[in-house]
Structures are given as structure tokens and as C-alpha cells.
Image (tube, coloured by chain):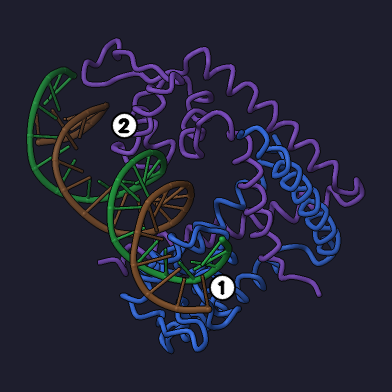
Chain colours: A blue, B purple, C green, D brown
Amino acid sequence: MEPLFVDRLLQITDLLQRDMAHAFDGTGLTTARVHLLWVLQHAGPSTQQSLAQLCEVSPRNITGLVDALERSGHVRRSPHPTDRRAVLVELTSTAVETMTRMQEEHDHLDATLLNAIDPADRPAVERGLSAVVAHLQSLVAAAATTAPEEAR
Amino acid sequence: MEPLFVDRLLQITDLLQRDMAHAFDGTGLTTARVHLLWVLQHAGPSTQQSLAQLCEVSPRNITGLVDALERSGHVRRSPHPTDRRAVLVELTSTAVETMTRMQEEHDHLDATLLNAIDPADRPAVERGLSAVVAHLQSLVAAAATTAPEEAR
DNA sequence: TATTGTTATACTCTATAACTATA
DNA sequence: TATAGTTATAGAGTATAACAATA
């Protein structure tokens, strides 16, 4: 009996998260902290405000994550050159190495997953998943505009 | 520029979770609690031990979730008929209604997602995602057997 | 007056360990 | 002796609100 299509997607969600969790098993890092490192790696040195926006999380939350990453030596706070209210958060060299390794694992996972699919099916899968993403984006966008009204 | 395949999957992961989170917006429920209700709906009245196994979570965690769901009127604890150590957790009629509605929304989401995919591509997408699931399962299984040794 | 980050407070999910009541 | 559930304790992620320093 075929599972529902959406259940297949949820199963992939679950498995991907488990697999990625194994990747930081020995590092003492967590999903939220790795996400912040990932954002930092791509954005470069950033203020906590901009990190909050990029991570879609409260500024207070960033304070906590940066505190933890500073303690574990993955991140450094330095004064902002022109705005004395702000700090710049940047990766340490240790973290740069860690993120480089994670990026490689990420690319490797991408290759092996694609490789698991019959080459003849790949274009159709690409098209299908793009369509699914587009549809989900429109659903989420629609919910985002109606939900705030309910909340009042 | 095409995103990596695995990034497309992660994007779907993120969007699915957001969309489903909207579904319990007004109910005061959370992901973990809805998951427990979902399990209960499919398993029927259960002891907390078996719920812990089905949810892959500690028994202590179930205590907290059941406490919260009992307070919000979604769940009832009743004495186990033959084992006086155990309790049976079951859905209240309110929760049965909620879960029925959620099941309908789930089926509806399944239909609309599938509908977003070109009919000609559907079989290939099915095959492709099955292969991805199988591959991820083997990765997770492999990590599960090696990780415990590192932990010692 | 507006913005940056922090302190204060609180809730949720999660875990392990010790304990109670029963098997 | 082993099992079911709870109390005790703890850590992580998350949020809002009040406040300090600076713009």
C-alpha cells in the first residue's frame, strides 16, 4: 500500500534531520547553533540584529546562541567600527574549519542522494519538487496574511 | 542557478513545518502535543510506556505532554484495568473532533501537493522519493550503529 | 525618538537519575 | 527483581517586556 505523498515528504523531513543531527554528534553543537554558524559563514561578520533577521528569530535568542558559541570558541564578538551600540559576530578559525567540513559533507550527501535516483527520473523529480516548493510557498504566504487577523 | 537537490529537500522540510504549524495556530497545541495526539488516534488508548516508545521519547517526557494535554482537555488518564501501576491515556471527544479535522486537512494537503505535479511526472517522482527514503534510511541506520561506540 | 544588545521572566521540549507503587 | 509513572534537576530553544547605552 502506497503511503500518501505528503507522508513521504514528512518521512524525508524526519530522516534528513536525524542524519544531519549525527553530523554534529561529537562537536557539542546543536541544530540552532549550527544554523547560526551556517548563516554567519555565508553572510560574513554580522551584527546580532541582522543575524536575528536572517535566522528569523528574536534578537534575545541570538544573544543566547552567540553566548554559547563564544564559550565553545566558535565565534568572536568584536566592537562595531562605526556604531558603538552594536557588536560584530564572526567565526573563529576553528569554526571556519568545522563549517568547511560540514559543507563538504553537505555536498557529499547531495551527490549520494541524487545518485540514488534513476538518472532517467531525475528531471521529472526536479520539476516535481520545484512545483511542490512553489505550492507550499504560496500556502505559507497565504496563511501568513490571514493568521495575524485571527490573532487579534 | 539550480539549488542543490538536498537543499530543495530541506526547503520542503522547512515549508511543510511552517504550514503545519499554522494548522494548530488557534488551538493552543504544539508540534509535540499534536504528535502525541496523532499517535494516540492511531494506536487507541495506550499506556505512557507504549506512547514513549511510539513517540521515540523518554517516559518522563510523556508525563509532561500528557499533563499539558489533560489540562487543555484533549486527553484523559484512566486506570489500567489489570495493571494498577499503569494508566491508560485516551483522547477526549473534543480531541477526536480536532484530530478528525486535522486528518482532513492532511488529506487535503496531500491532494493539493500531488496536484501541483505534472501527472506525467508523478510516477518518476514517486520512484525517486522512494529511492531517497531508502538511501536516507540506510545512512541513518549506519550512523546509529557507529555512533554509540564514539559516545563511550 | 529610535535602535542595539542585555537583563528579567517564562514556557516548551527534552534528558537522566532517584523514588514509589505495583508486578 | 523488574516495570510504570512521578518527582527532582538540568539544559536548550524560544518569546516578550523593560532597560541601558548609543545614534
Q: Which of B83 and B23 is in front in this view?
A: B23
In percent of width and height, residue B148 lies at 33, 62
At 44% across and 82% down in the image, what residue appears?
Answer: A95
At 40% across and 82% down in the image, what residue appears?
Answer: A76
Residue position for label 2: B63
Instruction: Give neighbour class at mark 1: few <14, some 14-19, many 20+ (Cα, 10 Å).
Output: some
Residue position for label 1: A39
**Can residue B51 be seen from the camera position used here?**
yes
Instruction: Give neighbour class at mark 2: few <14, some 14-19, many 20+ (Cα, 10 Å).
Output: some
Residue D7, picture quadrant: top left
- Residue B49 drawn above or below residue A27: above
Q: Is mark 1 on a helix, strand or loop?
A: helix
In percent of width and height, residue B145 lies at 39, 61
* Mark 2 chain: B
Q: Is residue B18 left or right of residue A90?
A: right
Q: Looking at the rendering, in which quadrant would you find the N terminus of chain A?
A: top right
Q: At label 1, which amino acid type do we have?
A: Val
In percent of width and height, residue B113 lies at 78, 43
Residue B26, picture quadrant: top right
Alpha carbon distance from label 1 to label 2: 36 Å
* Both labels 1 and 2 in a single chain: no
**Can residue B146 be seen from the camera position used here?**
no
- Residue B72 drawn above or below residue A119: above
- Residue B117, numbered circle: none
